[in-house]
Image (spheres, rainbow, N blue to C red):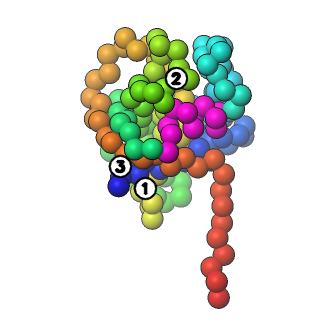
Amino acid sequence: MAYLYLNFVDNLEAGLGSKAWGRDDFYTNSLNEQYEALKPKLGSYAPDTLQQFIAQIFPTVSKEYYVSLPGFDRAIKENRRGKQCIYNLVIRAKKDIYSRTLPDNYDVIIIGDVTFGNVIDISVKGIELIDVDIAKYGEKSVHCTVACAFESKSFIPFK
């Protein structure tokens, strides 16, 4: 079974995110701040927290997603931590029964950086609503299960 690992931890709170990394990036607000700005557009569909919203849009079931690299620069680069990454991957969830938290005229997209390490994950840095009528070029369909991380855990090995 294929998994898509979404890391919300790095950019969840204020003071984190692209600005804190010294990168010149469009997404400088925390994900929680971005979600609060989206709530008026969602109206009565908006859950209280970003985590509740993401759990509804990206449920832990196998479903279809659309992935694209809309930027012109698609090269693999090295980030501050020395890991290889690709910046600004866009993921859009296919509308289905799990999308009931969205008004009919919107799709939700998340924007993140793919990091290649022991586990290939996508560090989410942006969340936006787009009109369903907007043409979406270059998307590739993937069928997978999403795993979302909202907190860090460390494991101490047995000795």
Query: What element does badge 3 sit on?
Result: loop
Kind of residue indicated by mark 3: Ile
Measuring 65% from the left and 88% from the top, which residue is drawn there?
159
Measuring 35% from the left and 29% from the top, which residue is drawn there?
70
- Nearer the observer: mark 2 or 1; the answer is 2
Kind of residue indicated by mark 1: Ile
**Pointers 1 and 3 in contact (CB under 8 A)?**
no
CA neighbours of label 1 inside 10 A, class few (<14), some (14 to 19), many (20+): some
Q: Earlier in the sequence, mark 1 or mark 3?
A: 3
Tag 3 residue: 76
Tag 1 residue: 120
Occupied quadrant, residue 39: top right
Q: Earlier in the sequence, mark 2 or mark 3?
A: 3
- Range covered by the magenta-colored residues: 50-60
Kind of residue indicated by mark 2: Arg
**Residue 68, position as x, y percentages in the image:** 34, 34
**Residue 80, position as x, y percentages in the image:** 53, 54
- Nearer the observer: mark 1 or 3; the answer is 1
Q: Is residue 94 left or right of residue 106?
A: left
- Front-lying residue, 136 or 86: 136
